[in-house]
């Protein structure tokens, strides 16, 4: 029996309009910059 890959995450689609997408992307960019300034890893922030 093969072991299942536990690293794979389930994806859940979320409906957003263009405004909500823009806000979300901007927040992720800001978080990435904050982590870069602190020297923290940014792999989880895309």
Image (cartoon, grey):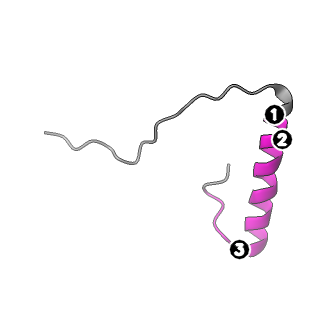
Residue sitting at x 86%, y 31%: 19
Magenta-drawn stretch contains 30: yes
Q: CA distance from mark 1 to mark 2?
A: 5 Å
Front of the two marks 1 and 3: 1
* Quadrant location of the N terminus in the rendered image: top left
Secondary structure state at the residue bearing disc 1: helix
17, above or below 42, in the image: above
Q: Nearer the viewer, residue 19 or 32?
A: 19
- The residue tagged 1 is 20
Q: Position of residue 21 (x, y in %)?
A: 79, 34
Which residue in the structure is indicated by mark 3? 39
Q: Residue at x 63, y 66 (%)?
A: 41
Q: Are marks 1 and 2 in contact (CB under 8 Å)?
A: yes
Magenta segment range? 21-43
**Residue on which disc 2 sits:** 23
Q: Position of residue 3 (x, y in %)?
A: 22, 44
Tag 2–tag 3 contact (CB < 8 Å): no
Assess whether mark 3 and mark 1 are in contact (beta carbons under 8 angstroms). no
Is residue 20 a member of the stretch shown in magenta? no
Label 2 or label 3, whichever comes before in sequence order: 2
Residue that extends furthest to the left in the rendered view of this protein: 1
């Amino acid at each position: 029996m093969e072991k299942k890959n536990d690293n794979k995450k389930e994806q859940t689609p979320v409906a957003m309009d263009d405004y909500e997408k823009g806000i979300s992307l901007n927040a992720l960019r800001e978080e990435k910059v904050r982590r870069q300034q602190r020297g923290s890893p940014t792999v989880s922030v895309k």
